[in-house]
Image (tube, coloured by chain):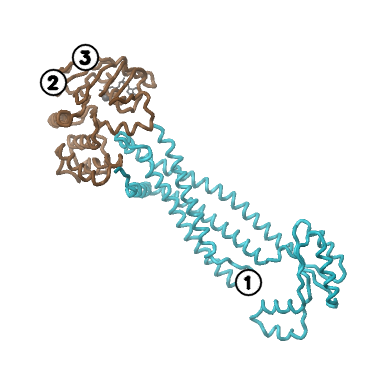
Chain colours: A brown, B cyan
Amino acid sequence: MIEFSKVKKVYPNGTVALDNVSFYVGDAEFAFIVGASGAGKSTIAKLLLREEKVTAGQLVVNEMHLNDMPDRVVPYYRRQIGMVFQDFRLFPNKTVYENVAFAMQVVGEPARNIRRRVPALLDVVGLSDKLKRFPDELSGGEQQRVALARALANNPKVIIADEPTGNIDPQMSMEIMNLLVKINKNNNKTVLVVTHEKALVDYFQKRVITLSEGHIIGDRIGGMFE
Amino acid sequence: MRGYSFRYFLAEGFKGLWRNGFMSLASVAVLTSCLIVLGAFSTLVANINFNLELIGSVNQIVTFLEPELTDEEILAIRDNILAMDNVSDVKYISKEDAYNSEKEKYSEYPELFAKLENDNPYNASLVVTYVNVDQVPTLQYNLNQIDGIYKISYRSDIAAGIRNFKNTVIFVSLWFLILLLLVSLFVIINTINIAIFSRRQEIGIMRYIGATNWFISVPFIIEGVLIGLISAAIAFVVDWNVYRYIESVIGSDIKFIMVMPFSQLMWMLVGSFAVIGFLCGAIGSLISLQRYMKA
Ligand SMILES: Nc1ncnc2c1ncn2[C@@H]1O[C@H](COP(=O)(O)OP(=O)(O)OP(=O)(O)O)[C@@H](O)[C@H]1O
Ligand SMILES: [Mg+2]
């Protein structure tokens, strides 16, 4: 599903963010990516979104080679990836319902499908009673759940979450993480979670890929935060 | 079936106009002024053409004949003129013809002509239609050489004067227009730039969820087009009312200028305003979008 082969990423200012990074995450697999600040975790997410291009090496997602993907194809590629960010990135002037619906509108989904699917998605994340709220009327955990529902809207094969619990209190963090695990299990989605939260990583006993200064220094199933 | 809702794009376009109120207003004001000036100049030129046509005799020279000429002599003069270079037609207007046509022109004053009936003061004339305006001086000279012609009336001064005026109007208005169109375009580009900039975060999120450049751009293009069409509508209403006002003033006070009925100009104005407004808005938006839609 996701394959990094000897990926190197050098930013225009000369910073080497990733060097010789290789790993493979299979269909319906769940993996944490951990590491100190500046280790290159977000860079992995940006490469996967094709927000940045690799400097050297190969990156293949869902059998698509991101290296030589034309810009014009990128939007269609991104629809196969559900992205969740630390800062939620919801549309502030759209309601909960509209935020999720908009993701479907963007891909030209017919209104009928949107009306049917959005309530179901918001039910999955437990927000059925807050459809008409605006993002600033929700807690951080609730906003992140909206973002998660939105990431699922177009039925992507992969969910990538970059520090999804970074702005959320511990109890809510557990809930978000539980949702991600549930989505992985029940919906057979490949889920990649970048995180700092040692307690959560240790609790779930999933695969853990550890980065340090742009290198992979650990990759263990049932691993612990180190 | 996938489909994009035009209503979404239109609503976003209007929202953009509203959010960006001050700049939208500025764009509309500038483009409207531009179109008003365009309308004023083009209706002026159309009216000049209209009046030139009404004068009609612009490529004609009227030669008045000595009153005592016989019919044979007049015919001979006519053939003589017809044989000259640069002459396409010669038409004979008898004393009676001249009297009748004048009488018709001043039909409001029949008593004036009743007195003249038995003492027709008009002269018979030959109306010479020429081909080339540049060779008129030669023709005039040749006509003057003919015995039996006592006066030549060539309205070159008026016709040429009107033509010069028209050319000046066209010249000035073209430069004015180009300048104003450039300013309008510049203001629209700026307006859309600001619109895009103020929504850059939303645009960023849209990109993450897989929106195409096309989907992101359409609302801004519609915003630009709306600016263009709103300006066109306002400019049309202004020009229309100004025209009607001028028409009422000239129509009642100045007898020798004819004002074209507005209905004959309306579709030209509607069409050119709509097209120019639309293009200005669309091109302005496209230019400013181009910079943002690279990635
Ligand atoms: N756009 C950029 N231009 C230049 N350097 C960058 C850019 N983005 C990241 N970097 C650098 O690349 C390295 C890796 O950054 P990255 O954001 O991937 O780290 P991270 O592991 O996500 O850190 P954190 O846990 O703090 O989010 C850092 O040294 C960072 O300064
Ligand atoms: Mg990061």
Residue B159 visible, this angle: yes
Q: Is residue B260 left or right of residue B164?
A: left
In the rendered view, would you say A108 is above or below A166? below
Residue found at x 74% / y 85%: B117
Looking at the rendered structure, the kind of residue marked 1 is Lys
Question: Residue B122's spot in the image, x, y percent?
Answer: 77, 77
Chain of the residue displaying label 3: A
Q: Is residue B158 left or right of residue B187?
A: right
Q: Which residue is mark 1?
A: B255
Question: Residue B93's spot in the image, x, y percent?
Answer: 76, 74
The residue carrying pointer 1 sits among few (fewer than 14), some (14 to 19) or many (20 or more) residues within 10 Å by Cα, namely: few
For the C terminus of chain B, the quadrant is top left
Q: Which residue is mark 2?
A: A205
Looking at the rendered structure, the kind of residue marked 2 is Gln
The tag on residue A218 is: 3
Whether the residues at callouts 3 and 1 have beta carbons within 8 Å, the answer is no
Q: Based on the displayed image, in which of its 4 quarters is residue B45 positioned?
A: bottom right
Chain of the residue displaying label 2: A
Looking at the picture, tell me which residue is in the foreground, A112 or B59.
Answer: A112
SS for tag 3? strand
SS for tag 1? loop
Looking at the rendered structure, the kind of residue marked 3 is Gly
Work out whether mark 2 precedes mark 3 in sequence or the reverse, and give the earlier one: 2
The tag on residue B196 is: none
Let me know if marks 2 and 3 both belong to one chain: yes
Residue found at x 14% / y 24%: A200
Question: Residue A225's spot in the image, x, y percent?
Answer: 17, 18
User: Marks 3 and 1, how far apart in space?
Assistant: 99 Å
The residue carrying pointer 2 sits among few (fewer than 14), some (14 to 19) or many (20 or more) residues within 10 Å by Cα, namely: some
**Image quarter where ligand 2 lies:** top left
Whether the residues at callouts 1 and 2 have beta carbons within 8 Å, the answer is no
